[in-house]
Image: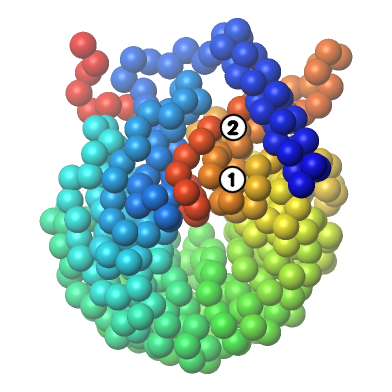
Amino acid sequence: MRKFLLLVVTLLIVGGLGWWYLRERQLPAYGPAYREYAYVTNGKSNTVSVIDLRTFQPAKTIRVGSEPTGIAANSKKNEIYVVNTQSNSISVIDAERNEVVATIGVHAGPYFIDVSGDGKRAYVANSKSANVSVLDLDKRLVLGNIRVGPAPGLAQVSPDGFTVVVSNRGNHTVSLIDAAQLKVRSTIPVCQEPEDIAILPDSSKAFVACAGTAQVASIDLKTDKLLALLDVGKTPVDLALKPDGGELVVTNFDADNISIIETSTNEVGGSYLIGTHPARGLVTSDSSRLYVSNFGSNTIAVYDIDIGKLIATLPVGSRPDGLALSRSENYLLVLDSQSGDVTVIQKRTPTKLEPSEYSLLTMIPVGVQPNNIVVKSFVLAKPVP
């Protein structure tokens, strides 16, 4: 307990110094119509916290449905979608006003939502109904509910929009949905307890993490065939793809390591110790850095992908989980699920006075049991007076 209190005091002091530094230095010159927000789902508060990333201050708390979990941003319009697991619904947030403007009912037990690249559709796996709800985001209604396997965990749409990949935890299969015809075209047996999904940028392959067998399944989306079952560490829970799709980082929760898969050859290139109970991974847009939240040690691991080495371990709040980057990628946002806050870590150019590349900027309180985070940046459609 004494060590924990000391860590909290240290974080508050450093966070306060970081906020003073933020106030004193010159902020980037944002235009008056520019907005950049982080949205955090608070599972036990039934709210979404909005953080203004221009000032790193809380902007608003939005009441949504019961037990919000998954969240996604629309890349084509200024909307945010929140999955309300206990309410069996989706809240639509207008990002310009930060208000709920619609609620769409789905079936039982939704947890996650994925939005198509054209911004017109969303897909929600309903874990207690063994189906996937397909949403028309322009009309804000359900186009259809497609029967899949039992206890589907995720439904993820391919970048080309043609295929929806669904991980069915209840019978250890993957359903492939034809997005044009809104029906299952294939059901593929894979490995035990499939859940997280990663699809290559060219939509040629999908990778599915199976927590029950310490494996990742590789599936050819052109032929609908299982290509390989790749052995990784114990309890793979998260897949982070490099932007070019060449490598896939697997976060192995109970092995305290990551595995790196060469996606073209379906080979595990290596495994590297990363921290205690790593939960999520996030790769920067230039593929130079991997950030991993260590749920069991209250730290963030910084892994240099180019040299293949862990270069920093940074203390954060209690039980770090979800990760997001600001648009500039100079700020890493860490969701601390137990302490109910977001830790902001700044990446900067080292100097003689400040030789560290990373520093704790501030900690922002959110709600109870935050579980997911997404960032949305945009320019207001109407000019600011």
The colour mode here is rainbow
The residue located at (35%, 80%) in the rendering is 128
Specify few, some or many for label 2: CA neighbours under 10 Å numbering under 14, 14-19, or 20 or more: many
Above-or-below relation of 310 to 343: below
Amino acid type, callout 2: Met
Distance in Å between CA atoms under marks 1 and 2:
10 Å
Q: In the rendered image, is residue 109 in sight?
A: yes
* Label whose residue precedes the other's in the sequence (1 or 2): 1
Q: Which residue is mark 1?
A: 339
Q: Quadrant of residue 230?
A: bottom right
SS category of the residue bearing label 2: strand
Q: Residue 70 location, x and y as percent?
A: 41, 58
Camera-side residue of 225 and 196: 196
Question: Relative to residue 16, is residue 374 drawn left or right?
Answer: left
Name the residue at 78% across, 69% down: 255
Q: Quadrant of residue 231?
A: bottom right
Percent across and percent down for residue 221 are 48, 77
Nearer the observer, disc 1 or disc 2?
1
* Occupied quadrant, residue 351: top right
Residue type of the residue flagged with mark 1: Ser
State left or right for residue 370 relative to residue 144. Answer: right
Residue extending farthest left: 139
In which quadrant will I find the C terminus? top left
